[in-house]
Image (spheres, grey):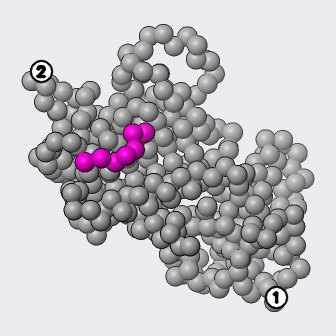
Amino acid sequence: MLDVYIDRKMIAAFVNGASKAKRETDISKLNLYVKAEAFIKKGCKLKLDSEIQSQAGQVLSYFTQGLGDNEKPSFTSLNTKTLTKNKWTVALLTSNSDFFDEVSKSLFTISTNDLWDRLSALLFNMPEQSTDFPIIPEGLNNHKDTPINLKSFKGWSSLLTHPLVPLTDAIIIDPYFLKPEAFKDSYDDYITSAYVNQSLLPLMKLLSHYALNKQLTLNIFTECYMDCNEIAQELFDYLNQTILDNQLNITLVIIVAKSLKQHKRILYTNYFALKTELSFYHFQEYKVTGYKKDDFLIKPFAVENPNIDPHTTMLDDLADFHELLQKSNIKIFGVKSNLSHIIPQAYNQVNQH
């Protein structure tokens, strides 16, 4: 589950703020505040500054009341190293903390000034945020059963107006990433330039738009049953050059395996998972190609219900990929040291017991 750290001064501000938030008269806002409070108390791995055990023990009952022994918060000494060791950390800090400026460059940090708005964004339950987009491809004519008022995914630009949290890492899983059937010429050869410019570049711009400090690590896992080193190398070179040409600060690595044992198309970030049945080559900036109706599901790792935890699924998947990276029959295109740090972190977290 998501690690959430709160420093000593912020603990008091959070408790007082929660009390004030419950007096909100706007029902939609009140609903968000209640969910955010529930997430902090029950739906995350809550870690409180150890100082409160001796200096602010009177607030502990607020965080532990009604929770089982295994769900009670733990205590730790907060410092830069503790907070930045895990890229799916959320830190609630007073802005005058000695390390606030440094950790806010690499983490989702929340201060007293924007406490509830930032928590609401993390929960992905803001009124304008849709987490389940129906996909109606251009080639599918019969879509009368789709409600008119339902938000739909009409290409990567559909996500530019939604309050996704700042990202540091993104991992794409798509077995057909090297076989973009929508981009073939009359000789049945893949057109790399069209694939990159029409489909992948809009995705890169979207990720860069939400990248924390406009810096993002991107790993793409795909598979190929026959020798496709030339195709993979050509795609990596063209995509990487396109990223540079568009001044997108994205560090790219493509990993090719014989089998991923994963046939859903997934985009994992350090704060949410985005899943679909369609391959990513179907998605362009303003449209979706193909003939199959589908859904685009965005599953935030911050959930107010601890029994629903998509973060655990992500940890298991990335732990499997860590083991995959140890095998000799994979091909890595790009610099191996640029592999996402959240992959070994996931492996360590899954195997910590």
Q: Is residue 124 visible?
A: yes
Percent across and percent down for residue 139 are 38, 16
Where does the image place residue 239, in percent across and percent down from the top left? 23, 48
2 or 1: tag closer to the N-terminus: 1
Give the main secondary structure of the magenta stretch. loop
Q: Is residue 133 left or right of residue 308?
A: left
| 262 magenta-colored | yes
Q: Quadrant of residue 186?
A: top left
Q: Which mark is residue 186?
A: 2
In what quadrant of the picture does the N terminus appear?
bottom right
Counting other residues with Cα less than 10 Å from the Cα at mark 1, is it few (<14), some (14-19), or many (20 or more)?
few
Residue type of the residue flagged with mark 2: Ser
Looking at the image, residue 139 sits to the left or right of residue 271; the answer is left
Q: Alpha carbon of mark 2 to alpha carbon of mark 1: how far?
A: 73 Å
Lateral position of residue 238 relative to residue 274, left or right: left
Which of the numbered marks, if any, corresponds to residue 193? none
Q: Residue at x 42, y 15 (%)?
A: 140
Which residue is drawn at the image coordinates 71% and 58% (left, top)? 43
Place of residue 341 in the rendered image (x, y in percent of width and height, measured from the top left):
40, 67
| Relative vertical location of residue 143 with respect to residue 59 in this rendering, above or below | above
Which kind of residue does numbered mark 1 sit on?
Gln
| Residue at the front extreme of this rendering | 353
Label 2 crowd bin: few (<14), some (14–19), many (20+), radius 10 Å:
few
Helix, strand or loop at disc 2? loop
Count the numbered circles shown: 2
| Residue of label 1 | 55
- State if disc 1 and disc 2 touch (CB < 8 Å): no
| Residue 11 screen position, x and y as percent | 77, 74
Q: Which residues are magenta?
A: 258-265
Of 54 and 196, which appears nearest the observer? 54
**213, 136: nearer the viewer:** 136
